[in-house]
Image (cartoon, rainbow, N blue to C red):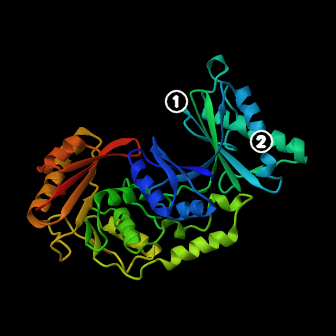
Amino acid sequence: MPKFFATTAKGIEAVAAEELKLLGAVDVEAGYGGVHFEGDLELLYKACLGVRTATRILMPVRDFAAKNPEMLYDQVRRIKWENYLNPEKTFAVDCTVAGAKALKARDGRIDAPPAPGPRGGLSHSHYAALKIKDAIVDQLRQKQGARPNVDTESPDLRVVAFINNERCVLSFDASGASLHERGYRLRGAKAPLKETLAAAILMLSGWDPRTPFIDPMCGSGTLVLEAGLMALNIAPGLFRDRFGFFGWPDFDEALWTKVSDEAKAQVRRRVEAPIAGYDADRDAIASALDNAKRAGLSKSVHFEKRTIETLEPAGSAAGTLVVNPPYGERLGEVEELKALYGQLGDLFKQKMKGWTCFIFTGNRELAKSVGLRASRRFELFNGPIDCRLLKYEMY
């Protein structure tokens, strides 16, 4: 059975693992920055279409020693690339060398590769990407008399290489564009959460879609929109018109049609409880409304310009509130934000009795200004920022 690897943001590997298990994946094992799993072609299609918290789904092809550029080139040439590419196809190479200054490079965008690292080792991602590209092109030109072209935007085959401790894991990208790119968010407020992280936060909160959900500082609406998709059981991949596996030689169009049709048939017609986002910024609400329209959620979620002081629960004695307030980058900002975090604490105490409230923040000093003791903490990362999801049970 084929083996796959779902990449995730740090801290949400276990959440993605549970999603994959529910889809039918086997031998699921959460690791650092992703989840190893196994499944057939149908499972791969379901994972790309329906997993809400994964960034990419990769299929490892080969794991080999790569102590220097020559060894990397030689090992890549040993792969039978004619099984995957021909002169009519396009490809691209993404490469990451752990610890390199250039953390990622895409083949086709490098004008002049630097010299290899000390003692002939591999220390530059873009240089390693070019060596992989050269090996593929040279082999196919020799065997087929012509070479495939590079297309960095939408290739038939995207090759992903990760080099660490003088070993290279070479994989094919089944996703295409990053899976966090749902397609509904064209307008964004300041520092929007990635959709995959927002979905993970909702899952960790334990929110039940049969109960109300509120985000009192919704920005461009990502948490609210992800909640709407979950409540209606809309697979996030249904917004996309292409996945990376479409260009693979074994792409089964009939099977893909079956999987996508089944996902469409499972969409619910209406939400069971109110899902609402509020923000004091008029432009943020305008962005959220635009995004909701693109997501087909205009009738399912509610956005409104409203301050924290005037916010009221959604007509229910119980529900879930999740907020992602600013973290503050400079000392002056942090001092100003203490009052905002205090307002959130007051909101929880005075108006959210019976609710479960969460604050997602990258500033633990500011979290102290809430004035409440968190009953649970989840360690997550918003990009490079070490964050906490703090749970407050308002009895």
Mark 1 belongs to which amino acid? Gly
Kindly state the secondary structure of the residue where label 2 is placed: helix
Task: From this view, report whether residue 29 is shown above or below residue 356.
Answer: above
Q: Nearer the viewer, residue 115 or 356?
A: 356
x 79%, y 44%: residue:
80
Using the numbered discs, state the Cα–Cα distance from disc 1 to disc 2 in whole angstroms. 25 Å
Residue bearing mark 1: 99
| Residue placed furthest toward the right | 145
**Image quadrant in which you'd find residue 162:** top right
The number of numbered badges drawn on the structure is 2
**Horizontal arrangement in the rendering, residue 274 relative to residue 382 (left or right):** left
Dot 1, how many residues are within 10 Å of its Cα: few (below 14), some (14-19), or many (20+)?
Answer: few
Asked whether the viewer can see residue 188, the reply is yes
Asked whether the viewer can see residue 194, the reply is no
Query: Residue 7 location in percent, x, y?
Result: 51, 48
Task: From this view, report whether residue 274 is shown above or below residue 85.
Answer: below
The numbered disc on residue 136 is: 2
Mark 2 belongs to which amino acid? Ile
Query: Residue 70 location in percent, x, y?
Result: 74, 26
Query: Residue 250 location in percent, x, y?
Result: 72, 60
x 76%, y 52%: residue:
84
The numbered disc on residue 205 is: none
